[in-house]
Amino acid sequence: MSRRRFPAGLPHEEMLMNMRGCFLAALVVFPLQLSAATLIHNVRGYTLHDGERLSFTALEYDKGVVTAIYDDAASASASKAAERIDGQGLTLLPGLIDAHGHVAGLGSALASVDLTGSDSEGEAVARLSAVAENGEAWLFGAGWNQVLWPSGEFPSKTSLDAVITDRPVALSRVDRHALWVNSKALSLAGITADTPDPAGGQIVRDDAGEPTGILIDNAMRLIAEALPEATVESKKRDLSRAMRYLVSLGMTGAHDAGSTALEVDAYDALLKDGEFPMRIYSMLRMADPLIEKKWLEGPRKSTGGLFELRSVKISADGALGSRGAALFEDYSDDPGNKGLLLLSDEELSRQISRSAELGYQVNVHAIGDRANAKVLDEFEALNASSGQRALRHRVEHAQILRPVDIQRFAELDVIASVQPTHATSDKNMAGTRLGEDRLEGAYAWQSLFESGAKLAGGSDFPVEPPNPFFGLHAAVTRQDRDGEPPGGWRVGEALSRNKALSLFTEDAAYSGHAETQVGRLLPGYAADFILVRDDFFAVPREQLWKNKVHATVVAGELVFGEL
């Protein structure tokens, strides 16, 4: 990875608007600067402008900024660029932005046992056993999903104890809202039959009242408190590992959905070292007990737009898979259970209102219909204050909505930050948890668009794979990567290719207050782009997820592949 420095500034917004006007009048835009520029030609280039697709065959950039695009080879020949690169007919797209991921979590997952796709409790244990001699004090893993197992039931400490007794084991469920641990981990955390369930959490117990080894939502904190203390250096390794991987997938930006105080320090250290291959839009994780000092310091930006810290992440409820999402009515497959609200009404209101007073964009995790309605109520109350709409508050996931609440996103100027692969991963489980009637407002991306709401697209990595083409495929087809179900699941909520690409480019940029800087390939915008094998607008829909990245460029600097 090359070390880079971003340009100190970008053109004034008025200047940008003038440039866009010229662009829309004619695709050939004369270069802003003629010296030391680079021209990449012989490409199938695409960008979006307010959802409208524009095509070009060559792109020119200088000092990290796009200076011109050309719609044919003849016009490109007029470029005075000092360097010319043959794109060899590849497709050139704006750099993709994931609007909701967990960067340190991904870095940690890349160094732990991958349980994704394990088809039984036994297979998950076998994968763990294969790396049991790695010498680490704790054994970590992530990605198990009991819904995909023949039993459909949560696993237990017993199967882990059968293979590992001398070291603690902690394995995160695919949604990171449940933890599977062995007896050693329970012992180190002091969790016994007498330990009460914490507020907003559950210690799953057997018929005798003994912990089974499954901890849900806030109960996971009991294990977190027993873990070895993380350091800035360890977090730097996690963040760096994740960012290097993300740029290899075609991402030039990511919104980190919950940075701890220690992770912010690690980001700052990486910036100082010049080891920052992509743009990060960070949300302070309000659940971090050490976050208050950084929170009270208020929003800040980094020079050149590499690292932005101007939002917070608050969690209102849990997840659907672990039955922690807060619902108005009981779970269809668990009578008497309506899920979990992780904060009291008073604490949720306090965190939201005080963060907004400090000038932060407030981003609240809400999956269940009850949690979504409650968060929208809070934002409606905020809108009574001057200037709150301009902060572009967000609901992270907006997954299960009452139809009556869909329209409220547009009415309140609240962004729905959605993850298309959640729909295709959850399709079999969601009907079981919710029943058919409640699916009407579930994973309802097209309905949100039609209501006039602003959306942003992400993956929730490492809950889901971080590959953005998986999300683009899911948004367009409403199918998983095996083509199931035929025709798509609740296909009326599928998106056009334009809308899907917009989720991960200009819409994601807007949701991070960066729509005049990134997300489009127009003169004056940052030269953040990717070269990929397949033409996104021509390849068969079912093959969208198979695209391969040849090169990733951020601010004109190659950070992955080759040109």
Image: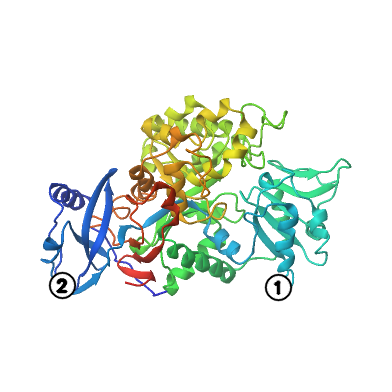
* Callout 1: SS: loop
Which of the numbered marks, if any, corresponds to residue 35? 2
The picture places residue 331, in percent across and down from the top left corner, at 67, 31
The amino acid type found where label 2 is placed reads Ser
Task: Please state, as top left, top right, bottom left or bottom right, where the C terminus lies in the image.
Answer: bottom left
Q: Residue drawn at (67%, 28%), measured in percent from left and top?
A: 330
* Side of 540 where 45 appears, left or right: left
The answer to which of 436 and 355 lies nearer the viewer is 436
**Which residue sits furthest right?**
208
Q: Residue drawn at (76%, 43%), measured in percent from left and top?
A: 197
In the rendered image, which quarter is residue 114 located in?
Answer: bottom right
The picture places residue 82, in percent across and down from the top left corner, at 18, 74
Q: Does any portion of residue 332 appear in the rendered image? A: yes
Crowding at label 2, few (<14), some or many (≥20) Cα neighbours within 10 Å?
A: few
The picture places residue 481, in percent across and down from the top left corner, at 51, 50
Q: Residue drawn at (23%, 49%), measured in percent from left and top?
A: 54
Is 292 rendered above or below residue 557?
above
Task: Please state, as top left, top right, bottom left or bottom right, where the N terminus lies in the image.
Answer: bottom left
Which of the numbered marks, if any, corresponds to residue 353? none
Query: Label 1: which residue?
Result: 134
* Callout 2: SS: loop
The picture places residue 445, in percent across and down from the top left corner, at 44, 37
* Side of 296 where 325 appears, left or right: right
Q: Does any portion of residue 190 appear in the rendered image? A: no
The answer to which of 508 and 333 lies nearer the viewer is 333
Is 405 rendered above or below residue 399?
above
